Structure formats: C-alpha cells, structure tokens
Amino acid sequence: MTRISVKVDGTAYEDEVEPRLLLIHYLRDRLGLTGTPIGCDTSNCGACTVDLDGESVKSCSVLAVQADGSEVTTVQGLATNGSRHPLQKAFHEQHGLQCGYCTPGMIMAARDLLAENPDPTPDEVRHALEGNLCRCTGYQNIVRAVLAAARQDTPARVPAQEAAL
Amino acid sequence: MIPAAFDYARPATVAEAVGTLDGAAEDEAKVLAGGQSLLPLLRLRLAFPSLVVDVGRIPELRGVREDGDSLVIGALTTHHDVIRDPLVRRHAGLLAAATATVADPAVRHRGTLGGSLAHADPAGDLPAVALALDAELVAEGPGGRRTVPAREFFVDYLQSALRPDELLVEVRIPKKDGWGFHYEKFSRTAQAWAVVGVAALVRREDGHIAESRIGLTNMGSTPLRASATEAALAGAPVDAVARAAESAADGTQPSADPSASPEYRAHLARVLTRRAVLAALG
C-alpha cells in the first residue's frame, strides 16, 4: 500500500491505496464521487475525463498514486454556491446531451479547451473533443453548447459561427 | 478492468531510477512515464510487471534546450509541451506537427516523447518521425550514458535497444532549419492509430530537391525509411515527386490487420508519400 494525499473538488483526502488502483476507481469506489463514469476502459471514449492540476486527463489512464500531491476537479466540483457552471448551463439549454453518459467527460474536455482558447471556432471545438465519444452521436448540439458557453464568457463575439453549424 | 498487482517505486532522480532498475530482476520492472501506453496494457493484463518504476516526478527529465546544432528534448517532456515549445517549432517543426496528431488532448497532456519512443510501437507516429529527423536517443544505465541513433533504436515490434537497466533520458534532434516538412496520416477515425503514416522532410535548393528524409509509420515491425524514394528525390526536379513516391513501399513488409491488408498498406504508403512530400515542398 502507498499513502497518498490528494485534493478532490476542494476537499483534501489522505488514503492508503494499492499502487494498481486507477484514479477513476479511487474517485468512484473510495470517495463515492460517481458523477464521473467509466465508459470504455480502453482510453478511447473520454467519459472519465477529469482535471488533474489544471489539465484534462482520462482518469482510467492515471494511477491514483500518480495523483499524489495533486488537485483533481471532477464534473461534481464545477458548480459554485449551487449555481451551475456556464458549460453545465449551456449543455442543458442547448440540449447537448441525450443519454448523458458522455456528458461529464465532454464538459471537462470542453472546460480544458476554453481555458486555453476562450473563443474557439466550431472546428477547434470538434478537434478538442476528438477524444470524447458520444454513442448517441449527439455531436451537433454538444459543439453548439460549447460555443454557447464560450460566448457567455466573451459577449463581444459575433454569433456567425453558430449559424455555420 | 483492474491491473495485476505490482510493487511501486517513485525515484526522485535519474541515478535513483537507474539504481532501482539495476536492482530489479530482468523483465520484471517496467518504467512508467506518462502511462498512456503502459496503463492500457496493464489494465488489459497484456503486461504484468512485478515492479513499476514511476519516473514522472524527475524534473531533470523534462524540458527542451539547444546544444549547438541540436535540440535536446527531455524524455519526460509531454506531447502537449512539445507541440507548444518555441524551440521545437523553430528547429524541428516536423516533430511539433506530427505530435499534434497523436491521440487526443487529454492523452497528450500525460503522454511523453520518451515514453512514446521507448514503447517502440511501429503504429505510433513519433518513432517514424524520430527516424526521419535522424534523432539520437540517449540512455542512462549503471555504466553511464550511451547514445543510440534512431535507426538502431527500434529493434522489433514493441522492442527498443534499451536494456532492462537503462532509462531513456533525452532525445537529441539535429536542427532542420529551412527544411520543409509534413506528417501525413491515414486513420479510420479521428483519434485512431495510423493505418499508415508518412513523415517527410525536404530541402530545396535552386528550384530542385536537394535531399529528403522520409519515415514510414506502420509499414513493418519497426518504423522505416523510404530509402528508394529518398534516393530518387536527391537532386531531382520538383515534378519528379509522383514518380519517386511509387517506390515508397519498396522493401517493406507491412502487416495485415482488420484495418488493412499488406497490399493496401503499400498502396497507402505510395499515395501518402506523394502527398507528404508535395506538402513539405509547400
């Protein structure tokens, strides 16, 4: 067993873990944070995407021991004071989900994009979400939702790109 | 899926990492860098080392610096950082361009240049790029450092020239200022492995092609150079590209898998080489 200390969604945890424990299993099974789903278990689908020290990662492809000393943000840590994150609102308003399984990963990947590129083109959104699969194939509205969330933060933006979708 | 149990070491320095590898029994230790190739293998239990040596917290393995006519990239430098590094973009644009096509943003945040090369997957994009760039790989073992040219580094499918007690510490790339470059990749879906990929570097002189370097991804059990095409392009006029690309698959033995037959891969190598060299010429 290896001792780790990690901050998840603002709460600090100290735990003894087996080195083989995946971060996704630590989040779900040990901390009870089941808002982040396991999709494919092969690194392909991106459903388990979380933020690790400011960067999006697939939490099925990180060991819990690798997150020792780090800060993790899951989709459950996005709302502030009971108010949804702009991306959560936009996915709701733009119907950016059907079954909802890919949504936590989509939102976390989109959040990573907007942190680096606050005003992306539709094409840039699609590239940024390349590692996130929606088996309902609801990509149109997912891209629309990300663009809507970006626009909220940059109100000066011309809405022409959405029309191009 | 859950990996088989293993012991875990997290050395703080290269010397400590090499000492740990040296002390471990042969074939039982695996080096963990970003983990984007190793963790899927562990999860599927295609690999079951008894010891995982996590080198992810060794700061001296990260970063890019210049050393005369070469760039020196720390093995632990992530794909994300390689793509954005101004020195890489200026002196080894092919590497930045090809790395941007690797997997997806989340994988590129964790995956490392050294890990990708040490994994020695002929379907990975970066081995062929390292080969085209005439990169040199620096390994550190108990006896010190040694430098292995890329053409000797990739030994067989998933097999590099690294010994069990050696750690890949840096990648040295001769600067290719003024060379045109392009990485042309054909895959079935956006983030999939390349069915075939072609890394092209071309130097023009007085309106003709002075020399070229062409690396092939997934055209055999190791990355390969399209030597016949390179020879045909040396000193050739620009309109000789299509004809030279016809020999791109000469001497290769590509594998068959559900994505492609060997014949189809050879076809792709010819077509993608033509496209890559033309794009590199600009």
Image: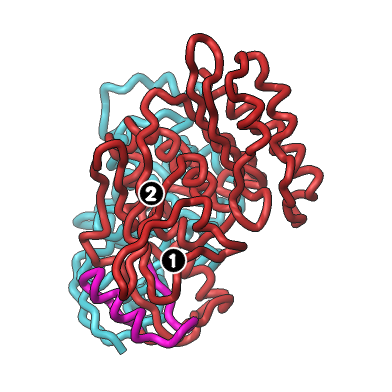
Three-letter code, disc 2: His
Name the residue beneath numbered marker 1: A61
Residue B44 as seen in the image, left or right of residue A1 = right
Colour for chain A in the figure: cyan
- Within 10 angstroms of label 2, few (less than 14), some, or many (20 or more) residues? many
Looking at the image, the residue that sits furthest to the bottom is: A1
State the extent of the magenta-drawn residues as a range: B8-32
Which residue: 53% across, 59% down?
B120
On the same chain, marks 1 and 2? The answer is no
Q: B67 or A116: nearer the eye?
A: B67
Name the residue beneath numbered marker 2: B79
Three-letter code, disc 1: Ser
Query: On the image, which quarter does residue B164 sit in?
Result: bottom left
Please state which of the two labelled residues, at mark 1 or mark 2, is closer to the viewer: 2
* Chain (red): B
Per the image, is B12 magenta?
Answer: yes
Which residue: 42% across, 46% down?
B135
Q: B141 or B124: nearer the eye?
A: B141
Q: Chain of mark 2?
A: B
